[in-house]
Structure formats: C-alpha cells, structure tokens
Amino acid sequence: MAEKDLNGVAVIAVSCPGGMARQFRVQVQSTDVPAGWKQVGSFRDGSQAGECAARHQKAGQKTRVVACSALPTAA
C-alpha cells in the first residue's frame, strides 16, 4: 500500500535521504562540449581530485576542481 500525505496525494521516497554526499568533480577545458568544460573524474576526497587535476595540468590541460554538495537539478 502506498503512503499518502494529509491531502491524500501519494508520497514518493527521496533518492538521496539526508542529501547528496559531497563530491569533487575534476573538469578540463574542452572545445568539444558546449559549456567548454568536460568532466574527467569525480571523487569523494578533495586530495584525490587535486591529484587528478595535477596530472591533467602536467599534460598541458587547463583544469578546475568543483566541490558539489547539492543535486545539480535542485533549484
């Protein structure tokens, strides 16, 4: 039996109870994608993301690390 709120509307469970776990996304500048940045890695640990970014920088790519703590589709 489905759960319903006080108005009788079906309640859907959240996909990320408590919110999204923090992650660090490593991106490199790219002309292949419209936004100009392409994701090359996603890490739970900031130092691992930094190491990944450093490897790409040594290869001559412009990089950035983005700390994400909210769902990208959330307003």
Image (tube, rainbow, N blue to C red):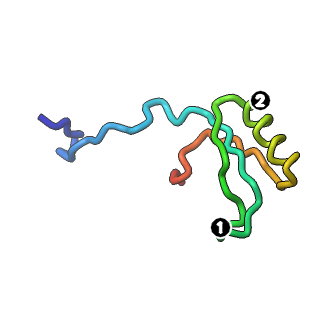
Task: Tell me how many marks there are.
Answer: 2
In this view, the residue in front, 15 or 41, is 41
Q: List the single residue furthest toward the front.
A: 59
Q: Position of residue 46 (x, y in %)?
A: 74, 32
Determine the residue positioned at 88% across, 46% down.
Answer: 58
| Quadrant housing residue 65 | top right
Position of residue 70 relative to residue 72, above or below, is: above
Position of residue 55 relative to residue 72, above or below, is: above
The label number, if any, that marks residue 6 in the structure image: none
Name which residue type carries label 2: Ser
The quarter of the picture where the N terminus appears is top left
Q: Are marks 1 and 2 in contact (CB under 8 Å)?
A: no
In this view, the residue in front, 36 or 60, is 60
Determine the residue positioned at 21% across, 47% down.
Answer: 9
Determine the residue positioned at 65% across, 35% down.
Answer: 43
The quarter of the picture where the C terminus appears is bottom right
Secondary element type, mark 1:
loop
| Quadrant housing residue 70 | top right
Is 54 on the left or on the right of 20, as rendered? right
List the residue tagged with mark 2. 47
Is 4 on the left or on the right of 57, as rendered? left
For disc 2, the neighbor class at 10 Å (few under 14, some 14 to 19, many from 20) is few
Is 59 on the left or on the right of 40, as rendered? right
The label number, if any, that marks residue 33 in the structure image: 1
Secondary element type, mark 2:
helix
- What whole-number distance in Å separates the C-alpha atoms at marks 1 and 2? 26 Å
For disc 1, the neighbor class at 10 Å (few under 14, some 14 to 19, many from 20) is few
Q: Position of residue 26 (x, y in %)?
A: 71, 45
The tag earlier along the polypeptide, 1 or 2, is 1
Name which residue type carries label 1: Val
In this view, the residue in front, 58 or 19, is 58
Q: Position of residue 44 (x, y in %)?
A: 64, 31
